Image (cartoon, rainbow, N blue to C red):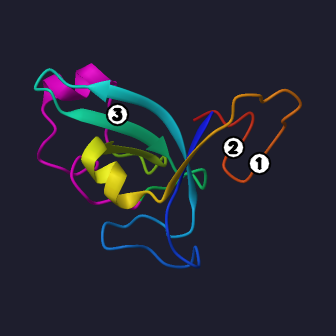
Amino acid sequence: MIQAGTPGTSDSYTNADGLVQSHAYSVLSTHKLSNGVRLVKMRNPWGSDSFHGRWSDQSTLWTEQFKKEVGFKEDQEDGFIFMQIEDYFEQVESTDFNYDTEGMYSDSFLMIGDDT
């Protein structure tokens, strides 16, 4: 499991691109598009997304081909976020890797049994 942590002092605030501050996001996958752009797919465990930077749900950068390449689903307020790798490095303060998940049943960034 990989967790991305955003900077800040309170999760009551969002940054200019709509990411919750002082918050943990699950990193689900990475993708390299046919045009060479590298994307990180993350999910807000709260199950909602407010990201409106490059490659957000409403972005004009998405073509039908790119959507197919990453399995993009139209905006469903499901917490899934795609972010260009360069933006990830600017937006995220820490990336944590959890190698041993034996005995884990929940954490602040993971919801077991979540159908989404």
Q: Position of residue 20 (x, y in %)?
A: 49, 67
Give the residue pinned by disc 2.
110
Q: CA distance from mark 1 to mark 2?
A: 5 Å
Viewer-side label of 3, 2: 2
Cα–Cα gap, marks 1 and 3: 26 Å
67 inside magenta stretch: yes
Q: Please tell me in which quadrant of the rendered image residue 85 appears.
A: top left
Label 3, secondary structure: give it.
loop
Find residue 55 and name its label.
Answer: none
Residue 100's image quarter?
A: top right
The vertical placement of 32 against 19, above or below, is above
Q: Is residue 75 left or right of residue 60?
A: right
> What amino acid is labelled 1 in the image?
Asp
In the picture of the structure, the residue carrying the numbered disc 3 is 73
For image coordinates 44% across by 73% down, the residue present is: 14
> Closer to the observer: label 1 or label 3?
1
Q: Magenta stretch?
A: 50-74
Q: Which of these two is toward me, 90 or 37?
A: 90
Q: Nearer the viewer, residue 88 or 16?
A: 88
Q: Is residue 18 above or below residue 76?
A: below
Q: Amino acid at mark 3?
A: Lys
Task: Point out the tag, 3 or 2, that comes first from the N-terminus.
Answer: 3
Q: Position of residue 7 (x, y in %)?
A: 49, 68
Indicate whether residue 4 is drawn in magenta.
no
Which part of the image, by quadrant, shows the N terminus?
A: top right
Q: Is residue 20 above or below residue 48?
A: below
Residue at left offset 80%, top offset 43%: 106
Residue 89 image position (x, y, % from top left): 35, 51
Q: Earlier in the sequence, mark 1 or mark 3?
A: 3
Residue on which the image places disc 1: 107
User: Mark 1 near mark 2, Cβ–Cβ under 8 Å?
Assistant: yes
Quadrant of image for the C terminus: top right
